[in-house]
Amino acid sequence: MKDTKLALILAAGNGTRIASRSGELPKPLVSMNGKPLLEHVMTGARQAGIDRFVIVIGYRGEVIKQWYESRPIDGVQVTWVTNPDFKKANGISVLLAREVIHENFLLLMADHLFEPETARSLLSQPLGLDEVTLGVDTKIGGVFDLDDATKVRLDHDRVVEIGKSLRNYNALDTGMFHCSPALFGWLEAAAINGDCSLSDGLRLMAQNGCFKGFDIGDAQWQDVDTPEALDYAKQIIAPQIQRSLGIARPAYV
C-alpha cells in the first residue's frame, strides 16, 4: 500500500467566535504560543510524513498566502484552492479540492491541534478504496467544551453516527481523517442546493459501512474555536505538542 503523503487543510472560515482575539486576522493566523494555528497544523503534518499540502482558503485568503510565502516550510509543496463561498458549510471547501486530489489524503482543520504521532498512526491504518477513517477520542470526560464537540457513535471500528447533537455516543471527532478520494462523491451526493457539511457526506458513508474510526488513545488534541479554547490550548495542550514539534519557527506579526 502506497504511503499517504498529501494533506488537505480546510482554512476558509472567518472564525467569528474567536474574533475578539483574531481581530482582522483570518483565524488560521491566530497566534498560539508564538506561531499561527496553521503553522502548528502544517508542522505537525510534516513530522507525520506529509510533504504536499492542498490548502483551501476563503476569508482573507490572500493574507494567509502572503504569510506562508514569507516563511515557507522547506521540502514542502503547497497548492492553494480558493473558496469564494466560505460562508457555506465546510463540505464545499472539501469538494473544491476534488480537481487537484486523486490519491489518498490526510484531511485536517486549520484550527485543530494534534500530536504528529497521532497523524502518523492514523495514516498507518489500512484504508479501502471507498473508505474514510476518522481519528476518534474515547476519553469523553477529558475533553474541553464537550457541548461544542462533534459526537460519534462507534460499533467496533465502524462509525455509525456522527453529529454535534447526538445523544447516544461513545467517542468524539478529533477533526483528523484519512480519506480515499471516494469522499468527494459522497459529499456531492449529500449536497442540497449547493451546500453540504463534511458530516453530511460522512453520514452517508456511515450508512453504507464505509466510515471507520481509529481510537487515538491517550494522545492530545484541541479544536480552537473560541477564546476560551485558545487559552486552554496554550496552557494544557500546546506544551505537550510542542515537545513533539521541537523549536518553533518565527511567529507571524
Image (spheres, rainbow, N blue to C red):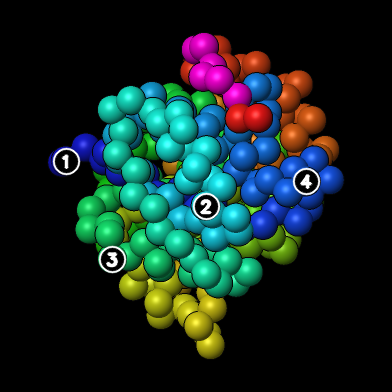
Mark before the other along the chain sequence, 2 or 3:
2
Residue 237 falls within the magenta-colored stretch: no
Q: Are marks 2 and 3 in contact (CB under 8 Å)?
A: no
SS state under label 2: helix
Alpha carbons under labels 3 and 1: distance apart = 21 Å
Q: Looking at the image, is mark 2 or mark 4 nearer the viewer? A: 2
- Say which mark, if any, is on residue 10: none
Say few, some or many: other residues with alpha carbon within 10 Å of mark 1 (under 14 / 14 to 19 / 20 or more). few
The residue tagged 2 is 62
**Residue 174 visible at all:** no
Amino acid at dot 1: Lys
Which residue is found at the position 40% from the left and 58% from the top?
81
Alpha carbons under labels 1 and 4: distance apart = 42 Å
The residue tagged 1 is 2
Mark before the other along the chain sequence, 1 or 4:
1
Give the side of residue 57 with respect to residue 79, left or right.
Answer: right
Please tell me whether residue 64 is drawn above or below residue 242 in the rendered image.
Answer: below
Residue 248 falls within the magenta-colored stretch: yes
The residue tagged 4 is 23
Say few, some or many: other residues with alpha carbon within 10 Å of mark 2 (under 14 / 14 to 19 / 20 or more). few
Alpha carbons under labels 1 and 2: distance apart = 34 Å
Q: Looking at the image, is mark 3 or mark 1 nearer the viewer? A: 3
Amino acid at dot 4: Gly
Q: Looking at the image, is mark 1 or mark 2 nearer the viewer? A: 2
Which residue is found at the position 55% from the left and 60% from the top?
58
Mark before the other along the chain sequence, 4 or 3:
4
